[in-house]
Amino acid sequence: MKHIRSILTLACAATLAASACAQGLGITDIMRAGPRIVPPAPAAGTPAPNVQRSAEYIVALVNSEPVTNTEVQLRVARVLRENPEAQRMPRSDLTRLVLERMINERAMLQLAKESGIKIDELAVDQAEQTVARQNQIPLTELRRRVAAEGLSPEQFRRELRDQLMLTRLRNAEVESKVKISDVEVDQFIREQRAGGNASIAPNINLAQLLVIVPENASDADVAKLQQRAQALAQRARAGEDFSKLVQENSDAPDRASGGAMGMRGADRYPTLFVESTQSTPVGGIVGPVRSDAGFHVLKVLAKSQAGVGDAVVTQTQVRHILLRNDPKRTTAQSVAQLNDFKDRIQRGTADFASLARDNSEDGSSKSGGDLGWSRPGQFVPEFEEAMNRLSPGQISDPVVSRFGVHLIQVTDRRETKLTQVEQREAARAVLREKKIEQNTDTWAQEVRARAYVEYREPPQS
């Protein structure tokens, strides 16, 4: 499988800041959310990678904070494990690149702390659970694989916390300042219709049927599970209702909704899924394809390009109760209050809309928390990830975001063509993401330029 990412890389992605935080790549990669595919679990009894440590010394100071030779060499070793392409680079060039990226990262983390950005334990817990859930493995298995990568639980959580801090810093320093004009939207739509924006990832909606392969399954067991997946794929190709096949046979948590994963940009799907279905027409069946979770049978439900008139998307009607961050109320207290609300709603002693009107600290409170029909990418990722896992009528557990803590309920879901207004908003969202990516690079360079960096002895393996 191509582009398999490490557990640590996935941690960055799940905290909405992707792979380069672990790999020492560019700042654009640090901030970009990406597909979340867990590497193969090490065989039983396989020791953690052995990284030879040279004598410890300081290789650079970033605003008086040291970067040590050991830290650089550990990062280099991780890059080499995770990126076979990096092995073709001269070791000295790779080490220099990794050091520069670590300096950039330190400078941004220092700015985040100076800006008063704090990440509480509940947000880190949620990020850790998201990594496990999106890779369809239990939290205990995630932690085992983290240990196999040579990371202690404390180091792993520190990486999660750092990436959440970087994401929130970018939100404040870059995202909030990005504006897209109507002229830019008009130009984008013209180019899309003329086929001139091939670089923009299309929107796709896939459904999956998953046959999980348990950890340490024998070759015989894997063969049987593959045969089961092949038989199910054949039934789907023969015309059986895919949604029903999923509901009755899939091991994935989304089976109740027929396995549909929702209309969104191809860059927000696992690379394996995109590569497997890129030449498949709407309605086509692919698979089984193998990932570290098991065997996937995929159905292409829809394909479209943002800004094109026939675009079809999955829209979700959703409402929420928001308790904002407040110095007088901790995140844990907000979570406890929203858990109480959820319990009362499920017991029938309270109504969601009434609780939202009386308690939600959001402009939607007047309408009982109703946010209307949403399109993919409209909400912050942590909110949207939780929303997409809900079937109509279901209520989430409390969700921590940069705005506070949410209780989310999905009331309905539909596949629909976008109106002209919605097409323009979808195009605006695509343009906004591109401009955020570009501005993030510039901003990161400015942060680096403001930092005092003193180079000491060169890193040595």
Image (cartoon, rainbow, N blue to C red):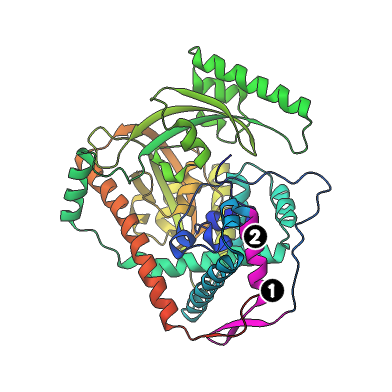
* Residue at which label 2 appears: 78
Residue 179 sits in quarter? bottom left
Magenta residues, as a range? Answer: 56-81
Magenta highlight on residue 20: no
Residue 398 image position (x, y, % from top left) = 54, 54
Residue 326: percent from the left, percent from the top?
48, 71
Question: Dot 2: few (<14), some (14–19), or many (≥20) neighbours within 10 Å?
Answer: many
Q: Is residue 71 magenta?
A: yes
Of 288 and 315, nearer the camera is 288
Left or right: 295 as drawn, with respect to 423: right
For label 1, the residue is 70
Q: Is residue 311 above or below residue 91?
A: above
Q: Is any part of residue 288 visible from this angle?
A: yes
| Pointers 1 and 2 in contact (C-beta within 8 Å) | no
The residue under the point 47% across, 45% down is: 387
Give how far across and how far down residue 410 sits, in percent.
45, 41
Mark 2: which amino acid?
Arg
Residue lying at the far right in this picture: please name it: 45
Q: Nearer the viewer, residue 395 or 305?
A: 305
Q: Say which label, 1 or 2, has the lower sequence index.
A: 1
Q: How many marks?
A: 2
Residue type of the residue flagged with mark 1: Thr
* SS for dot 1: helix
Check the image and report above or below for 74 versus 367.
Answer: below
Q: Residue at x 47, y 42 (%)?
A: 269
**Can you say which quadrant of the picture contains the N terminus?**
top right
